[in-house]
Amino acid sequence: MKKDRPYKIKHIKSWFNSATGIQLVLLGLLGLAIIVSTGMGYIRIPFMDVIRIIIAKISGNSDLLKNFDEVLQVIVMDVRLPRILTAAIVGGGLSVSGAVFQGILLNPLADPYTLGISAGAAFGASLAILLNLGLGIYSIPLFAFAGAATTLFLVIYLAYSGDAPAGGLSSNNLILSGIIVSAILSAGISFLKYLADEQVSIIIFWLMGSFASRTWTDVLLTLVCVGIGFLVAVFFARDLNLMSMGNRTATSLGVNTRRLTLVLLITASLMAAICVSVSGIIGFVGLLVPHMMRFLAGPDNRRLLPLSMLTGAILLLCADTVTRAVLPHEIPIGILTALIGGPFFCYIFRKRHMA
């Protein structure tokens, strides 16, 4: 038995270090974080009571909730859980989007905001707040998504060049186009703030990002869109690996670099757009998480994308829980992620500059 022990320990370590092992561990941590976060807040709910409420609602077994306070059921299912799940899905979507951008542009500083997606969403949301068209709670997400999508196609149009090696698009052109469009839209947002008067506080709060007042509709919308985008990204993960070897090498191995660049660029951008339209501006998640996961999984996108999605979900969920239930007063989630991601961005930039 003693002779078998080193082999078993080695086998356990090998499984834990494998992609499947890490994914299962992260999936378990995500489930635990969801349950613990649901119980935290102004009204504390025991761990087992949260599980009991969720199981009863999913299974439809009302006997589990006999003599149970209905207020707690409303708090768990209608107030906290939609916000928590939305935060997790948005974190996963932004992380996958950032990993795809970095793989396409071959730039470690790329994230969902490099191409001006955040500026486009911010301009659309600001316009919706200013116009107040009477579309209810969906007017801001709808305009934010429309602004982000329009910005994406404008950036692609400006960046297109027939001489580019990737069939018309190069990373430098895309980044420069994103900077130009972002600068113009930032000026437009400032002008809308000037016109907003009393509503300027609403615009500023949205720009800082928040998951307050999320509903099950938001959960379903983000889950479907992020899920489809993730499946597309994973489907082309092998081709994305080949593109990291250079366009000529990828082309010689049968990869249509032009089509792949457009498909993944549009997929990642629309994933970021739907996330931003629901949550507001939340920066640095798409930059921070893929770099963290490369230390564990390496550069293989077939392993990197699933791990980035799970880690991004955990990270943003924990950050939102801190702002909602730990701090004395709730602060916008975008401020906390900027405080964490800003120094990390400076570190990567400096390290890349020294290399």
Image (tube, rainbow, N blue to C red):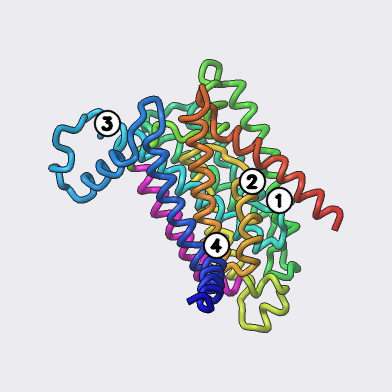
Q: Earlier in the sequence, mark 2 or mark 3?
A: 3
The type of residue carrying mark 3 is Leu
Which disc is residue 177 wearing?
1
Q: Earlier in the sequence, mark 2 or mark 4?
A: 2
Residue at image location 68% in from the left, 38% down from the top: 184
Mark nearest the camera among 2 and 4 is 4
Looking at the rendered image, the disc whose residue lies closer to the viewer, 4 or 1, is: 4
Q: Which residues are magenta?
A: 217-240
Judging by the rendered image, the residue that carries numbered circle 3 is 72
Magenta-drawn stretch contains 9: no
Asked if labels 1 and 2 touch by Cβ distance under 8 angstroms, the answer is yes
Point out which mark residue 305 bears: 4
| Res. 38 in view | yes
Amino acid type for the residue under numbered disc 4: Leu
- For residue 116, the mark is 2
Q: Which circle's residue, 3 or 4, is located before the other in the chain?
A: 3
